[in-house]
Amino acid sequence: MPNPSKILILFNKVVNFIVYLLIPVVILALLIGIARVFLDIRIVFQGKSITQGFDLLITDILSMFIVIELLRSIIEYFEAHRIKITLISEAAFVFILREVMIGIYSHTIQALEIAALSLLLLVIGSIRTLAIRYSPGEGFEGHPRGKP
């Protein structure tokens, strides 16, 4: 029977390799996203109305912020070997705020949807606050603010 510690070491190496492969993919996605933003600028000038062009441009830019937050999460995992709830919650904040801003800007979001998304933001904010308040410290994992 294989030694559990050797299996754990192998698992960690495989996970590190996969995360290492994800970083260039996300960077490539960022570069493609930036290129798309620049290409979509022409729609502002060539579109039927300036509003149509700005709708697309704002959506692209807000989507880029989501990718940036996810990239931060991947890099943090690679450095600390754990997923930080605070970074994931920030990405969720950006995603939800993107949806609200696009919905309000395009006049397609209903009051009930805004209320539901606001409640979701409140829940995510509470989780983020608890994650900061009870963040594990160096060597004292699982204790409030790292204290035993």
Image: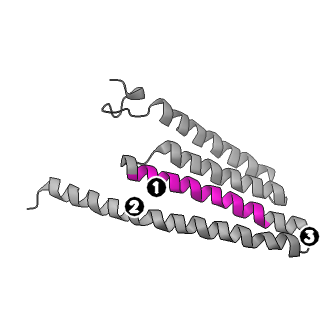
For image coordinates 33% across by 63% down, the residue present is 17
**Quarter of the rendering occupied by the N terminus:** bottom left
Q: Amino acid at mark 3?
A: Ser
Q: Position of residue 83 (x, y in %)?
A: 43, 48
Q: Position of residue 75 (x, y in %)?
A: 45, 53
Query: Are the two marked residues, 1 and 2, in contact with CB atoms closer than 8 angstroms?
Result: yes
Q: Amino acid at mark 2?
A: Val
Q: CA distance from mark 1 to mark 3?
A: 39 Å
Q: Is 69 in front, or is 126? A: 69
Q: Which mark is residue 19?
A: 2
Q: Is residue 69 magenta?
A: yes
For image coordinates 64% across by 44% down, the residue present is 121
For image coordinates 60% across by 39% down, the residue present is 125
Residue 108 to residue 44: above or below:
above
The residue tagged with tag 2: helix, strand or loop?
helix
For image coordinates 64% across by 55% down, the residue present is 65
Q: Is residue 26 magenta?
A: no
From the image, tell me which residue sits under label 1. 74
From the image, tell me which residue sits under label 3. 49
The residue tagged with tag 1: helix, strand or loop?
helix
Residue 14 to residue 119: above or below:
below
Q: CA distance from mark 2 to mark 3?
A: 43 Å
Find the magenta span and give its range.
56-78
Q: CA distance from mark 1 to mark 2?
A: 7 Å
Q: Amino acid at mark 1?
A: Ile
- Indicate the colouring scheme: one colour
The quadrant in which residue 15 appears is: bottom left
